[in-house]
Image (tube, grey):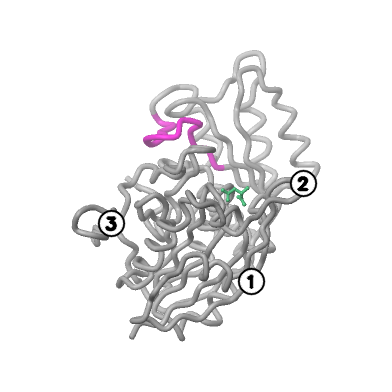
Amino acid sequence: MKKLLLITTGGTIASSPSDEGLIPALNSQELLSILGLREEHIQLDCEDLLNLDSSNMQPEEWKLIARRIYEVYADYDGIILTHGTDTMAYTASALSFMLHNLPIPVILTGSQLPLLHPLSDGVDNIRLAFAAAQCALHGVYICFNRKLMLGTRAVKVRTMNFDAFESVNAQPIGIVDARGLHIYEKDAISLKGKCELYDDLCEDVYLMKLTPGMNPEILDVLANMNYRGIVIEAFGAGGIHFIRRDLISKLEEIVAKGISVVVCSQCLYENSDFSIYQTGQKVLRHGVIQGYDMTSEACLTKLMWALGQTADPQTVKEIFATNYVNEITLK
Ligand SMILES: NC(=O)C[C@H](N)C(=O)O
């Protein structure tokens, strides 16, 4: 008999109406009674860890969740984590970097419409999460709208539609069709060693979307605020302006100060490659790190995690040149 753990953290799935709008209210027992799941063939434990709208989920909560998973994973075949959708991709990415070689699946899910609503998408999402948590998978995944996605590749792309998440630059690793849940094992996360918790994160990392005409001095402001890492969503395949407002020289100054800078694309799909254009190549000469096809959520959390492990910019570069959980396609 499989032994599963349901950890709740809030989100719309657990929300009910209040005078101030939807707020998380339901605990795990209430969620289960609405679901009416008849899981006689599994042994299920429940834990109410947090009750937050995911807009309030921050690195402190990621650490709490990661530590709890690390404490209990050995007792379970799989863990289901209910979570708000708005920042679920950040949490899933952060957990993916903090928990190395998790031998069991940790499946994050939630819903767009509260489970209390008769038309909620939460019922299907939780059912899929229970199915996925019983599979022979390792590591952190998000399941939503009949898709199972790598935790570092899922991005919330829709505010209202039930198909709220896409798996970006990687196929979903599981889909539900007439065969039931079908897993593409070759794309799943593989175990490379012993399970370890690395729960140090640097919160002083800024994600910036480049806009035409952006004043380079904004980077001085971040340096003066002691930010240690900056992720820049640059233009297209890889470009940053240098005429009139010379952002590239400013990046050189910033990197020379020991701040780690990662560049990725503000296009959601396909990889960035800063070696294609002059406007990109100039950036690379100054020791800026390429994010290639990583999502912005994965770039940000990987940089927070890398700077939590080391103060040495060269080691940060090495971390970004490593593929941990299929979060990046390296050449
Ligand atoms: N659908 C949701 O869960 C949205 C909610 N605001 C949250 O992220 O907690």
Amino acid at pointer 2 = Glu
Q: Which residue is mark 2?
A: 20
Question: Is residue 192 shown above or below 154?
Answer: below
Q: Nearer the viewer, mark 1 or mark 2?
A: 2
Residue where numbered disc 1 is placed = 49
Query: Where residue 98 appears, x then y in whole percent?
Result: 54, 66
Q: Which residue does the image show at 48% across and 80% down from the upper left?
A: 73
Q: Does the magenta segment cover residue 326?
A: no
Q: Residues within 10 Å of mark 1 (few under 14, many from 20)?
A: some
Q: Which residue is mark 3?
A: 187
**Coordinates of residue 269 in the picture (x, y in percent):** 40, 34
- Chain-order first, disc 3 or disc 1: 1
Amino acid type at image mark 1:
Leu
Label of residue 109 in the image: none
* Quadrant containing the N terminus in the rendered view: bottom left
Q: CA distance from mark 3 to mark 1?
A: 31 Å
Name the amino acid type tagged 3.
Asp
Q: Residue furthest right?
A: 224
